[in-house]
Amino acid sequence: KAGVTQTPRYLIKTRGQQVTLSCSPISGHRSVSWYQQTPGQGLQFLFEYFSETQRNKGNFPGRFSGRQFSNSRSEMNVSTLELGDSALYLCASSWTAANQETQYFGPGTRLLVL
Amino acid sequence: GQNIDQPTEMTATEGAIVQINCTYQTSGFNGLFWYQQHAGEAPTFLSYNVLDGLEEKGRFSSFLSRSKGYSYLLLKELQMKDSASYLCAVAPGGGNKLTFGTGTQLKVEL
């Protein structure tokens, strides 16, 4: 069974631009969560989608948004990029929305904002 | 608020045993996860505890005390490949949201 895939793997943008990242969960998984990882803050939860509905949201500004499609693939968008948005963006998928379920992480998209 | 503390760095010798501690204060609790993350790679699941006690899985064991807000990950028979960051994460409740500690960077030396 293929793992979680994320595209693109690397991205360079400039301040003020917007970016869209994509995540394809493991086949059959319906929950997709997004995290931001930086050296200073560690892994921080962005949001979770289950069956095309946002179930949880972290403490990030409205510039960060996401959506999930009927095939469970998810995208996240960051508008008006800031230097501080440079980070590794990870998505994780699981079968259900029950938090006892193991989450499987993708390889991440490394975003550099110049 | 949510607060998860773990040591920043640890060093241990190949073949030895190391214990990585994690203390947490969260507004809710529905389980604690440990993940391993090698540099440049995705976190991989190691263990999940929701009840007090020790869970053993091969060379890795994880312990939880809910009353103390405390967990540890025990790695036995350390190997060089165990050099990685170990992340403690709490599920505060409701969905798959996880709150992570900043990770413990473990270095295994000869």
Image (tube, coloured by chain):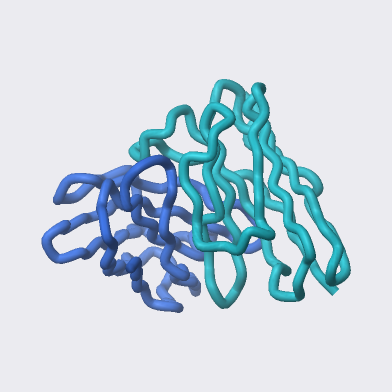
Chain colours: A cyan, B blue
The furthest residue to the left: B67
Q: Which of B81 and A113 is in front in this view?
A: A113
Q: What x and y, as percent, mark residue A1?
A: 61, 24
Q: What x and y, as percent, mark residue B54?
A: 19, 50
Q: Which residue is drawn at 54% across and 33% down?
A: A53
Viewer can see residue B60: no
Image check: A18 left or right of A71? right
Image quarter of residue B51: top left
The number of discs equals 0
Residue A68 lies, with reference to residue B91, above or below; the image says above
Image check: A9 left or right of B30? right
Q: Residue at x 54, y 44 (%)?
A: A33
Q: What x and y, as percent, mark residue B109?
A: 49, 74
Q: Which residue is drawn at 49% across and 34% down?
A: A94
Image quarter of residue A10: bottom right
Q: Which of A114 and B40 is in front in this view?
A: A114
Viewer can see residue B63: yes
Image check: B90 left or right of B54? right
Image quarter of residue B19: bottom left
Q: Residue at x 41, y 58 (%)?
A: B99
Image check: B47 left or right of A33? left
- Location of the C terminus of chain A by quadrant is bottom right
Residue A63 lies, with reference to residue A72, above or below; the image says below
Q: What x and y, as percent, mark residue B53?
A: 15, 50
